[in-house]
Amino acid sequence: MSGAPIDVAKALAEGAAARREALIADLVALVDLETPSDDLALLRSGVEAIEGWLESTVGPAARRVAVGGQDAAPHRVLDYPAPLVSGSRGRVAVLCHYDTVWPAGTTAERPARVDGDRITGPGAFDMKAGLVQFAHALALVDGLNLPRPSVRLVLNGDEEVGSVTSRALIEEAVADSGPVLVFESSADAAVKTARKGVGMFDVEITGVETHAGLDPTGGASAIDELARVVLALHGAADLAEDTSVNVGVVSGGTRRNVKAGSAHALVDVRVSSAAEAERIDGVFATLAPANPEARITVSGGWNRPVMERTEQTAELFRLARQCAAELGFDLREVAVGGASDGNFAAALGHGVLDGLGAVGDGAHARHEWVSIDGMVQRTALAAAVLARL
Ligand SMILES: [Zn+2]
C-alpha cells in the first residue's frame, strides 16, 4: 500500500473537518424533509429528494433498484462499484433507513435547529445523521482516490414499523455481499456489535358470553383466561438469560355484567440467543385455557432474529477500533436490546457493524440530538473503515 496508515488517517480527519458545514446543512435539510413511516406521499417525495442529494454528494449509482411506493413504503438499493484503483475488494452492504417515527407536521412545531455543537429535530439522531455521514464518508474516500470495496446502499422506508415490506429486499441485497455496515445511531458513542431478537406476538382469546349474575357458573370468561396468560408470559421472562417479556396492551369484554367473550393482548419479547427464542416459542405454543370452553390463538412471531456477536462481527469491530485509534480516539462496543435491519444480515451469517451513525441521544424522543463534532469524527471513521475493508 502507498503511504503509512497515519497519513491516510490524517487526510481523512482533515477531509471530514472540511465537510463540517456541508454535514450540518445536509442534516438540517434531511430533517426538514419529513418522512414518517406511515405517510406514503411524504416517503415518495422524501426518497426522491434523498436520491437527488446522494447523486450530488457521491455521484450517480451504477445500478438502481426501486421497490414499493404504490401501496407500501418505497425502498431503494443503490450500487457504487469500486473505483479502478481498488482492484478486487469484494462488496460491502450499507444499511440505512430514511423513515422516522415522527408524524407529518412535526417539523412545523420542531424544525431542525443548530445550537452550539448540537443539531436537534425529528429523526436527526435516528437516523438521518447516519445517512449524511455515510454519504460524505464515501465521497471523502473517492475524493482522495483511496481504494475501497464496492458499496451497496439499501435505503429502507419502513424500518420503524418493523421492515415488513423491506426485509426480503434487504436479505437479497446483502446475500452476495461481505461485511454489512449499519449507520443507525451509536449508543453513547459506542458501536453496536450485538442486538437482541425481537418478538411481536398477539394473543387472541375467545370466551363464551353469559349473564354474569344470572349464570355465574356458565360460559367462559376470556378476561379470566387473559389474566392467567399475562402471568404465564411475564413468568417466562428470564433476566439472567437476558430475556424480557412485556404484555404492553390488553383489551377485552363488552359490558360489566357480561362474561367476556373476547380478550386480546399485544406482547413484546426480547432475547439474546436463538435458544431463548426457541424456549419462548414453546411457552406460546403451550398456552392453554383453564376453561376448556375458551380458546387461545397466538399470532405474530419473531420480527427480527437475534444479532449475535460472531467472530466476523468481532473482527469488523477490531478493524473499526484500529481506524478510530489512528484517528485519535477510542471506539467502544456494546450489546443493546433494540433491533435493527442489522439483525436480518447477522442471521444470514454476515459480520455486522451497527451503530456507525450519529453520536448523540434521544431516539424516538422529543429531545433527540446529534453532536456536530461527532458527525465529523464518525464521517472520518466510516471513511477509514471503507478504505480499510
Ligand atoms: Zn433507526
Image: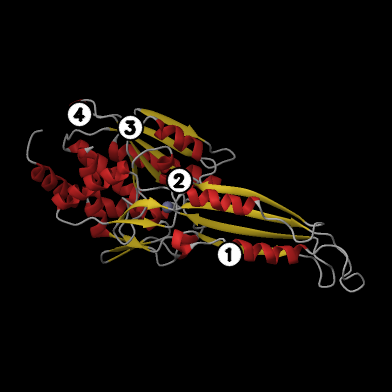
Would residue 80 be found to the left or right of residue 328 on screen? right
Front tag of 2 and 4: 4
The residue tagged 2 is 46
Residue type at the position of mark 1: Gly
Is disc 2's CB within 8 Å of ligand 1? no
**Mark identifier at residue 60:** 3
Identity of the amino acid at label 2? Gly
Residue at the spot x=89%, y=69% of the render?
211
Which mark is drawn over residue 86?
Answer: 4
Q: Quadrant of the N terminus?
A: top left
Considering only order in the chain, which callout, 4 or 3, is on the residue closer to the N terminus? 3
The one nearer the camera, 380 or 258, is 258
Pick the residue in front: 281 or 142: 281
Q: Is residue 39 visible?
A: no
Q: Earlier in the sequence, mark 2 or mark 3?
A: 2
Question: Distance of mark 1 from mark 3, alpha carbons?
Answer: 54 Å
- Which three-letter amino acid code belongs to the residue tagged 4? Ser
- Secondary element at image label 4: helix
